[in-house]
Image (tube, helix red, strand yellow):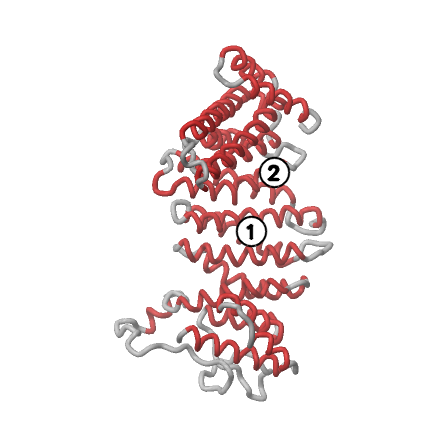
Amino acid sequence: VGSRTAMALLLTICKASCIITGSPAEEKEFTVGTETNSEKVPLLLRKIAHNIGTNVLAATARAQFFGRLEFPSTSPGQPTGTISTKTNSIGPFMPMVTRIGTVSKKSSSASKNDEKSYSDQPIRMNAAVIIFCLVYRDIDKLTSCGKAFSYTLPVMLSLMDDVRSINQALGALMLLSFVEASSRIENNEIPSFIENSSSIITKSLENAIQLSSRQDATFLTTICLAQSEWLRLLFNWIPLASKSSLRPTTVHAWMSKAASDNLVAVRKQVQMGGKDKNDELIVGALVAGIDPLLADLASLPNAATIEIARVGLSAILPLIGWRGMSMESRSIQIAALAGLLSLLSGAYPIMTHHGTKIMTEVLILLDRSDKDAIFMRDNDQADKSSDKLRNDELSTESVVSVALHAAAATLVICDKGADTVLSHVQKHGTLQYKRVSQIRNVGEKLQNYY
């Protein structure tokens, strides 16, 4: 059907839901206004969910996704609203419409049973993802969140276990919606539905990242963000898990493994350089996945990143030296510096052994950024007002600011090794003297924080 017919049908359903709940006057808010269809659809779906209940809408979306949606029974033997096995019952749900000539004659019923229900009907997948993501926006109670999650989980896992990256990203998007809703709810104990599904969701995210590591950057970024936010949710629930079988050491191990695996994958991507939009993949993995995990691990009091420190440095140091002046290159450098700061804090007992190479890489980046700034100032006077030049200048200034902080933190934590390099550069190197003084001044201010 066309967009106008679909919107008219959705509006009719919304009006009917208002009448069922005894509030037909509220339908007027959807009949007027300047909203586009993309803005109206979420409003209408949220209104329908409010009227008929999120559980009914979520259960219907799951049944539609798996191709199990049939007419609800109205027989006296069954409660109203239950799913019936009879296909000739009379009810408000219409069967799936199939255009004439679209069904292959070669396909048999036996082969159909082996196929995933959403493979031949992508609209089932799209509708389920949209509905489930919208359902969580208005949930403010733990019981409602748990019931909705029970319907979401099989759909979400089916998508994340798919071989196509776009389906994996859609499953990750559903998980992000659930995590956002769960984070808003205050509770004194970790919910059982989160505890029971923690292991299988963590494993599914791990497999999805491995499959999508060389695909579209948007898909990889979405899955990495879902993984870091999911593990952060478990990480934040840890203090409440006194009566739970989910222990802090288990969650910390999951976080360390996820960070280590992603760092190894990024290290392999570094060998390919910036071709084929590889830099976008690296930025997405760093910003959405690696940096948040390293930051959470660094907040633990027991230097939790010692075991992955060598892997982290082997991946992050080459990224600090990433060549280029584009926004993607600058983003890689800043994200790598942020990851380095987390590693310095989370693995401080052994960082004294790596102070020389860390300070060397950061100083080289500072020197190159200063030269880039001079190049842009001297060679682009004719195009001074261009947005691209201004963005390049701002990104270079940002890299310099973060690099100064990283160099100062390296000086404080790594002590003699980093100080030896800094003294040598100050005496014999080409780096501006003011940068060395700035690093030492910032280091003095950071003494109380490390």
Relative to the observer, which residue lies in front, 410 or 375? 375
Is 251 drawn above or below residue 113 in the view shown?
above
Task: Identify the amino acid type marked 2.
Answer: Leu
Regarding residue 328, the answer to whether it shows in the image is no
Judged left or right of residue 428, residue 235 is right
Mark 2 = which residue? 297
User: Which residue appears farthest toward the top when viewing the image?
Assistant: 427
Image coordinates for residue 4, horizontal then vertical, percent:
44, 75
Name the outermost residue toward the left.
Answer: 106
Q: Residue at x 33, y 77 (%)?
A: 99
- Check disc 2: other Cα within 10 Å, few if <14, some if 14-19, many if 20+: many
Q: Residue at x 40, y 76 (%)?
A: 1
Q: Position of residue 65 (x, y in %)?
A: 46, 68
| Quadrant assignment, res 191 | bottom right
The answer to whether one can see residue 205 in this image is yes
Q: Nearer the viewer, residue 148 or 185?
A: 185
- Relative vertical location of residue 164 with respect to residue 292 in this rendering, above or below: below
- Number of marks drawn: 2
The kind of secondary structure element at disc 1 is helix
Q: Residues within 10 Å of mark 1 (few under 14, many from 20)?
A: some
Question: Looking at this rendering, what residue extends furthest in the front direction?
Answer: 382
Q: Is residue 318 above or below residue 411?
A: below
> What residue lies at 39% left-to-right and 55% top-to-bottom?
164
Pick whichever, 111 or 349, lies toward us.
349
Tell me the CA gap for discs 2 and 1.
19 Å
The amino acid at mark 1 is Ser
Instruction: Say if 447 sits above or below 338 in the image.
Output: above
Q: In front of the other: label 2 or label 1?
A: 2
Q: Which residue is mark 1?
A: 199
Residue 125 % position (x, y): 44, 65
> Which secondary structure, mark 2?
helix
